[in-house]
Image (spheres, grey):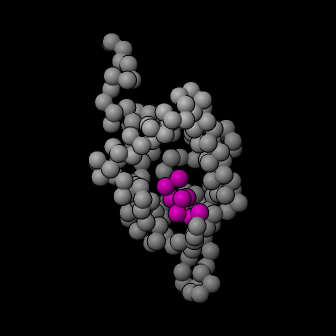
């Protein structure tokens, strides 16, 4: 089979392949930092807990998934020690989801490994090139109708 040079691939496919490889790299780094069971889809839920304590129903709406899928993700993250459920102070029928200290560590570690990867890229390609690439990918996202999902933090969950 003939080899393929990455620069010869269309930009959409190259972006997808690059994102998949970068995610594998980031997950490997997070696992080395003590998060052995973390998956890419966990980040999609955890981001909604950074600035609040939503209910499972809120999470399902925000992530645009069924309550069953959101609940399954919460159960998994709860089992792994990243989130906890607690009774709402105003209505004890309502259960809110919040980050645990371990969940906050995962968020901090995720930011750290992404910053490290970004620094490696800037060292390799230069800050202007990285900025131009980000602008180009943002324009591609606009062109295919995905930018608004990103703005709303409702991008579809990846298949794990």
Residue beneath the point at 47% across and 67% down: 59
> Hey, which residue is sitting farthest bottom in the picture?
90
158 or 111, which is in the foreground? 111
- Quadrant location of the C terminus? top left
> Hey, which residue is sitting farthest top in the picture?
2
Q: How many marks?
A: 0
- Quadrant location of the N terminus? top left
Q: Is residue 8 visible?
A: yes
Q: Is residue 28 visible?
A: no
Percent x, y of residue 102: 69, 56
Residue beneath the point at 51% across and 59% down: 45
Image check: 135 left or right of 82?
Answer: left
Image check: 78 left or right of 68?
Answer: right
Percent x, y of residue 103: 65, 57
Is residue 81 magenta-colored?
A: no
Percent x, y of residue 156: 38, 54
Residue beneath the point at 57% across and 71% down: 53
Percent x, y of residue 56: 49, 70
Residue beneath the point at 52% across and 63% down: 48
Q: Which region of the structure is painted magenta?
A: 42-50
């Amino acid at each position: 089979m003939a080899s393929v040079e990455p620069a010869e691939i269309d930009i959409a496919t190259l972006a997808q392949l690059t994102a998949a490889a970068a995610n594998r790299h980031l997950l490997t780094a997070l696992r080395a930092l003590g998060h052995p069971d973390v998956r890419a889809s966990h980040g999609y839920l955890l981001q909604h807990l950074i600035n609040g304590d939503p209910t499972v129903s809120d999470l399902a709406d925000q992530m645009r998934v069924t309550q069953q899928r959101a609940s399954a993700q919460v159960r998994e993250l709860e089992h792994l020690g990243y989130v906890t459920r607690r009774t709402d102070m105003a209505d004890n029928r309502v259960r809110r989801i919040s980050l645990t200290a371990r969940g906050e560590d995962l968020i901090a570690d995720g930011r750290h490994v992404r910053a490290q990867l970004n620094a490696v890229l800037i060292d390799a390609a230069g800050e202007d090139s990285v900025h131009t690439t980000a602008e180009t990918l943002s324009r591609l996202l606009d062109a295919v109708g995905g930018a608004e999902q990103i703005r709303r933090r409702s991008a579809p969950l990846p298949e794990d």
